[in-house]
């Protein structure tokens, strides 16, 4: 991953958490997270949110809801980079 690592890492967090990346992509994201505290905080938040949702409701989250939440988080992080 190069200079745009943070955008790339943040845009692939759900895929990373869901195990939907190739082994090379997973390793690249993992390496980035190990060296980037803001992205690691975002990852930790997303992982905890995913865990909370899984514990709270056993039904799978509808894809359109997941996309809306991801879009809202992305918009918030774009408008307030200090929150990421």
Image (spheres, rainbow, N blue to C red):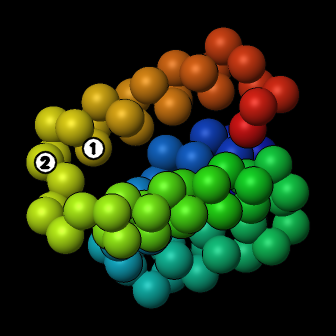
Farthest residue to the bottom: give it. 23
Q: Quadrant of the N terminus?
A: bottom right
In the rendered picture of this protein, how many numbered marks are placed on residues?
2
User: Dot 1 corresponds to which residue?
Assistant: 66
Residue located 84% across and 58% down the image: 36
Res. 28 image quadrant: bottom right
Residue located 64% across and 27% down the image: 77
Judge whether residue 13 can be spotted in this image: no
Res. 79 image quadrant: top right
Query: In x, y percent, where is residue 61?
Result: 19, 54
Q: CA distance from mark 2 to mark 1?
A: 6 Å
User: Dot 2 corresponds to which residue?
Assistant: 62
Instruction: Answer left or right for 11 relative to 58.
Output: right
Q: Nearer the viewer, residue 31 or 47?
A: 47
The correct choice, above or below, for 40 with respect to 3 in the image is below
Residue located 58% across and 47% down the image: 10
Q: Residues within 10 Å of mark 2 (few under 14, many from 20)?
A: few
Instruction: Answer left or right for 72 relative to 27.
Output: left
Q: Nearer the viewer, residue 84 or 61?
A: 61
Asked if disc 2 and disc 1 are in contact, CB closer than 8 Å, the reply is yes
Instruction: Answer left or right for 14 relative to 62.
Output: right
Q: Which mark is residue 77?
A: none
Query: In x, y percent, where is residue 25?
Result: 49, 73
Instruction: Answer left or right for 63 relative to 73.
Output: left
Query: In x, y percent, where is residue 75?
Result: 52, 20
| Secondary structure under the numbered disc 2 in the rendered image | loop
Residue located 29% across and 30% down the image: 68
């Amino acid at each position: 991953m190069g200079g745009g690592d943070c955008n790339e890492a943040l845009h692939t967090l759900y895929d990373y958490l869901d195990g939907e990346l190739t082994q090379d992509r997973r390793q690249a994201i993992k390496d980035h997270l190990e060296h980037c505290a803001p992205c690691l905080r975002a990852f930790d938040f997303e992982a905890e949110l995913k865990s909370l949702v899984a514990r709270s409701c056993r039904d799978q989250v509808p894809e359109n809801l997941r996309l809306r939440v991801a879009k809202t988080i992305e918009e918030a992080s774009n408008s307030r980079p200090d929150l990421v």
